[in-house]
Amino acid sequence: MTVAVLVPWRPDCGHRQRVWAWVRAQWARWLDWEIVTGACPDGPWSKGAAVADALRQTSADVLVVADADVWSDGIPAAVNAVAGGRARWAMPHQLVRRLTEDATRAVLNGTPLDGQPTQETHPGMPGGGIVVLARNVLEGVPMDPHFEGWGQEDQSWALALTTLAGPMWRGTADLTHLWHPPAPRRSRAVGSTASLARYRRYQAASGQVSQMRALVAEFCPTPLEGQPMTYRYRNANTNDEVEYAQPNARLEMLPNWSRIASPAETPEPDDNPEAEKSTEPSTQSTIGRPSTSEPKAAWVEYATSRAKDSDEVDEIATLTKAELVERYGSDDKE
């Protein structure tokens, strides 16, 4: 497997240039991977167009789409998850640590990154910061180039990836975001009215494969086909199989459970004659509601499986166990 780092980038002569020089040095020193910067045409910034430009410059099998102002020690684990076939796309981090301006200046001047003060720490937005993908996934579910400026392109991309490629693998590392002057935007959460309207289209198509594929086809001639990948596990003692939309942390740790290929990953009957001979039904389930005595992690996993969009997933990460039980403990939640 060959790996390339794709960085959407528009050169400037100011602070962002110095930040990217520091980040690029981390890539060059720590990992022996190809580093490719992608640009977009003159005019409004389009991260999607810049990522597409970087993709055209490499033939690597696994792509790491990374912003020019972030770093995470969890990157190799995310790459291994995709290269090993455990997921079609992955993110290395859970939390984003946004450094202060003074801390960033210190890092750029040679102070170690660890332990620097932050102005904010929050759950990482799916699709943002650093995303690792198999090449056919990035080609079939590219980032939408119609988003201009800052805002909503990452969240929309995550909805498209989840719907067409399946759930992401997510690591537990932190992602550090170096300070720079913020991009122009309508508000802290919304880039522009146009971007918000386009994001609403992704929300409407979330979970609807044909609808999402049609939306992606507006800018991609070959939207990803086939069924989304899932997380499927088999019990070595009973041969029972269960399937989840997200990784099941408990089953990942138990020695008698192992992850197997989902139906979408197995060969067609013509390629696998033995498949036609099997008449044993499999036991399939969704994530069951945990008991109130189970740890918060189990409730986060269950609540995430019932979330309707990425905004709800992000909110789940901020709730206490008591709040999760109160909100998701009833079977009648629509």
Image (cartoon, rainbow, N blue to C red):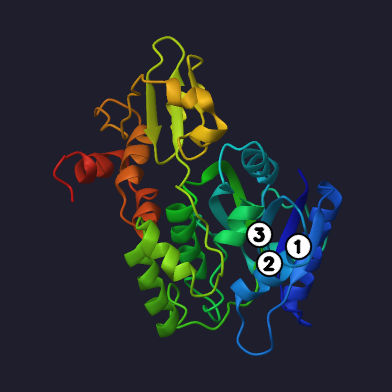
Q: CA distance from mark 2 to mark 1?
A: 6 Å
Q: Which residue is nearer to you in this view: 272 or 178?
A: 272
User: Which residue is labeled 3 in the image?
Assistant: 65
Q: Give the number of the disc on residue 69.
A: none
Name the residue rendered at 82%, 63% in the picture: 109
User: Which residue is labeled 1 in the image?
Assistant: 106
Question: Residues at badges 3 and 1 in contact (C-beta under 8 Å)?
Answer: no
Name the residue rendered at 60%, 78% in the picture: 46
Q: Residues within 10 Å of mark 3 (few under 14, many from 20)?
A: many
Q: Position of residue 278 (x, y in %)?
A: 42, 20
Name the amino acid type tagged 2: Asp
Quarter of the image where one finds residue 183: bottom right
Question: Residues at badges 2 and 1 in contact (C-beta under 8 Å)?
Answer: yes
Q: Position of residue 71 (x, y in %)?
A: 68, 55
Mark with earlier residue (2, 3): 3
Above or below, 39 relative to 129: below
Name the residue rendered at 68%, 67% in the picture: 102
Name the residue rendered at 21%, 46% in the picture: 327
User: Does the rendering let one see residue 334?
Assistant: yes
Name the amino acid type tagged 3: Val
| Residue furthest out toward the top | 237
Q: CA distance from mark 2 to mark 3?
A: 27 Å
Residue 238 in the figure: left or right of residue 306? right
User: Which residue is labeled 2 in the image?
Assistant: 102
Q: Secondary structure at mark 2?
A: helix
Q: Residues within 10 Å of mark 1 (few under 14, many from 20)?
A: some
Q: Position of residue 79 (x, y in %)?
A: 67, 44
Q: CA distance from mark 3 to mark 1?
A: 26 Å
Residue 149 in the figure: left or right of residue 38? left
